[in-house]
Amino acid sequence: MGYAKYLQADFVCLISSQNNTVPKHTRIYSSPSNSNPSLLFLLKRFAARTNKAGSSAYESRDTVDPSLISQMLMTLLEANGQHISPTLLRKRVRDDVCWADGAEKPWRRCPLWLVLRVALQRHLCSLFGGEKGHIHYKFLICLVLASLLDDSVEHLSPDLLHVLKAKLCRRLVKLEVGKQRAPPVVIPLYEHMFAILGPIFEKTTQATIKLLNLKVSESSCRKNLN
């Protein structure tokens, strides 16, 4: 399949260096009240700060200190359960700051999307093992992008459709390269997944390309008439 290749600079982070598990019915602490002064003080202590008019002020647009989760919560979980060592995940984080007009939420990427991807990949790695779980995760993300492209093909502008198609094609190219470099033990899994999902990806990309070409032709015709 002929998928265009796209390159993009990124950062690699490890998720996560500390992992703990607790029994399902273990009660660690009572549900806190929103009016609890000690809780509010604790949250403000870890919030991002900035200097305004010579005094320290809360900065909602900056990232917060992760110590509340990575140190305090993980310590509570380990004290009530046990430490585990699952497959270490490496995520490529592509984000930038859109600071125009003093945006209240300047981060371009949605943090919930990162959390969902990490949870999904962690679950698949637990089910199928590290390498096979990673392959299942990559194909599943491609399937999600293809479904999104199918659902939005009549609703998005040509520019956004092209960006979404490029995301799908870039991931498919990486899977093809990964198949060529993969050890023999996982090559049958690549072939099986491509055999099942390949026609879906091909149909989606070809339909999108056809629609984009049609919209370009219509735009050119309107310009000529004008």
Image (cartoon, grey):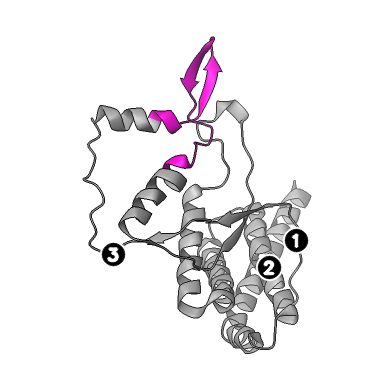
Q: Earlier in the sequence, mark 1 or mark 3?
A: 1
Please give the residue where the numbered disc 3 appears in the rendered image: 23
Q: Do the CB atoms of the residues marked 1 and 2 lie less than 8 Å apart?
A: yes
Spatial CA span between label 1 and label 2: 8 Å
Residue 222 location, x and y as percent?
Answer: 71, 51
State the residue in front, 79 or 213: 79
For image coordinates 54% across by 22% down, the residue present is: 50
For image coordinates 56% across by 86% down, the residue present is: 196
| Left-right relation of 183 to 43 | right
Q: Which stretch is magenta?
A: 44-68
Of the two numbered discs 3 and 2 in the rendering, the one whose residue sits closer to the viewer: 3
The quarter holding residue 5 reads: bottom right
Instruction: Specify the quadrant that holds the N terminus.
Output: bottom right
Residue 34 location, x and y as percent?
Answer: 25, 34
Q: Which of marks 1 and 2 is nearer the N terminus?
A: 1
Spatial CA span between label 1 and label 3: 45 Å
Residue 130 location, x and y as percent?
Answer: 55, 74
Question: Is 47 located above or below residue 146 in the figure?
Answer: above
Residue 115 is one of the magenta-drawn residues:
no
For image coordinates 30% across by 33% down, the residue present is: 39
Q: Determine the secondary structure under disc 2.
A: helix
For image coordinates 50% across by 79% down, the residue present is: 128
Amino acid type at mark 2: Cys
Amino acid type at mark 1: Tyr
Please give the residue where the numbered disc 2 appears in the rendered image: 169
Instruction: Characterize the local packing of mark 1: few (<14), some (14-19) or many (20 or more) Cα atoms within 10 angstroms.
Output: few
Question: Is 109 located above or below residue 131 in the figure?
Answer: above
Question: Is 126 located above or below residue 63 in the figure?
Answer: below
